[in-house]
DNA sequence: CACTAACTGGACCGAAGCAGTCCTGATTGC
DNA sequence: GCAATCAGGACTGCTTCGGTCCAGTTAGTG
């Protein structure tokens, strides 16, 4: 599981394409240059605009323009713009108070650390990191395989404020 | 997106339940004590057995037994047992060489670091971590931008019974 | 030795969410 | 005024998942 929506993948392609030029670009133009069907590109662009990742210019000679540099766009933002808030469980986004049985619900809140970890991992990888080939591993590897007994209380996140990663290594 | 399969959530419940006793437990018994429908429990247990997380004893007086302690079972293993290999993109698990257009495929391999980060985050959280209420938050949540609208960044006050589920009722 | 309890493996069906398309309206440059 | 472009929705086909059921196999028990 943990499947990423295909639209999100398209969104990354579109954003990178958008970063390749300085002027505004039209959705038909992006569709032509990326090979993605035009309606799909338009749909992605709309979601991206709603998410604040790109700005739009209406009317003739209009188009889309990147709002931020690729290195300032974490993938979490892209996913959030396309797929909505990042959460693994269905419980967190809606029916928090009602579950099927009382016996299985004590586990509900327990997914929070997992959600948090995922969210964090998605926040520290930017589109610039996905664009370049060499990516500095965000997490060092403390536990190989399944030997991780507990979460290290003192984590290294102090060095990463929120968004971008260093250039490369 | 990033939706976690409901079966995986059930699997966690079942595994925790399994850890609550030392002998073997039958799937009808687990179903009765957790409230999950018996066929579903059986299905989950089958996947868990295939994944090597639990061992099964066939025949009369048979049942299932936990293969490892909860603290040695990362959620990644549970997800892998239920949902298959952890990967966000559909490209990685099958049609790696063929994509729709050449323009969007340069992004294909770029999801690898994201997959890796997710996988890593999932590997360092075990069922024992999900079981206890007070979880040492490995990553503090910067919670800027669109972090968590409803999830408290710090460890929430434990309002749910921290220990395992009560006995069969 | 027969019976029963329990797991094994598969097939099956309905429901839900997603991918993709299309249409109509609003906006703006020429 | 016209044309190009974005905005926002509705709609449909499809894939996948959730859940159930069945026949078969194994092993303990009377």
Image: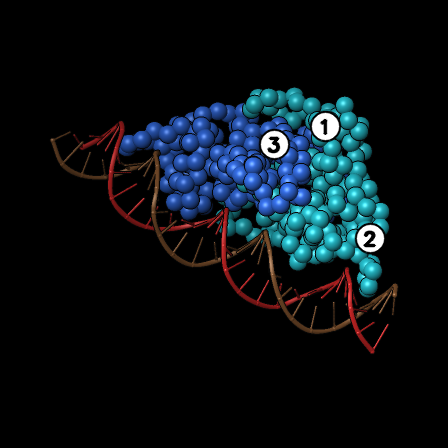
Chain colours: A cyan, B blue, C brown, D red
Report the residue at 82% width, 64% height from top. A59
Whether labels 1 and 2 belong to a single chain: the reply is: yes
Residue visible at 37% across and 41% down in the picture: B28
Residue located 59% across and 40% down the image: B89
Residue B61 showing in the rendered view: yes
The residue that disc 3 covers is B119
Q: Which residue is mark 1?
A: A134
Q: Secondary structure at mark 1?
A: loop
Q: Is residue B64 left or right of residue B134?
A: left
User: In the image, B58: left or right of A73?
Assistant: left
Q: Judge depth for marks 1 and 2 and give the one in front.
A: 2
Indicate the chain on which mark 3 is placed.
Answer: B
Q: What is the number of the mark on residue A24?
A: 2
Give whichever of discs 1 and 2 has the lower sequence position: 2
Chain containing the residue with disc 2: A
In the image, residue B127 above or below residue A67 = above
Residue B17 shown left or right of residue A36 in the figure: left
The percent coordinates of residue B162 (x first, y second) are 58, 35
- In the image, A169 versus A60, the foreground residue is A60
Q: What is the crowding at mark 3: few (fewer than 14 residues within 10 Å), some, or many (at least 20)? A: many
Q: CA distance from mark 1 to mark 2?
A: 29 Å
Q: CA distance from mark 3 to mark 1?
A: 19 Å
Question: What number is the disc on residue A15?
Answer: none
Q: Nearer the viewer, residue C13 or C29?
A: C29
Q: Are marks 3 and 1 in contact (CB under 8 Å)?
A: no
Relative to B117, does residue B40 appear above or below in the rendering?
below
């Amino acid at each position: 599981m943990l499947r990423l929506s295909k639209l999100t993948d398209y969104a990354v392609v579109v954003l990178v394409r958008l970063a390749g030029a300085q002027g505004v670009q039209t959705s038909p133009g992006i569709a032509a240059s990326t090979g993605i069907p035009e309606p799909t590109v338009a749909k992605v662009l709309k979601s991206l605009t709603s998410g604040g990742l790109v700005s739009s210019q209406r009317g003739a000679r209009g188009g889309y323009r990147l709002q931020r540099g690729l290195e300032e766009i974490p993938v979490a933002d892209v996913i959030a713009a396309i797929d909505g808030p990042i959460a693994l469980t269905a419980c967190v986004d809606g029916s928090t108070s009602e579950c099927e049985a009382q016996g299985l619900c004590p586990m509900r809140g327990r997914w929070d650390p997992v959600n948090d970890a995922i969210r964090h991992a998605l926040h520290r990888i930017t589109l610039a990191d996905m664009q370049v080939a060499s990516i500095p591993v965000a997490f060092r590897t403390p536990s190989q395989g399944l030997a991780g007994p507990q979460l290290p209380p003192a984590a290294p996140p102090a060095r990463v404020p929120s968004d971008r990663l260093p250039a490369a290594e």
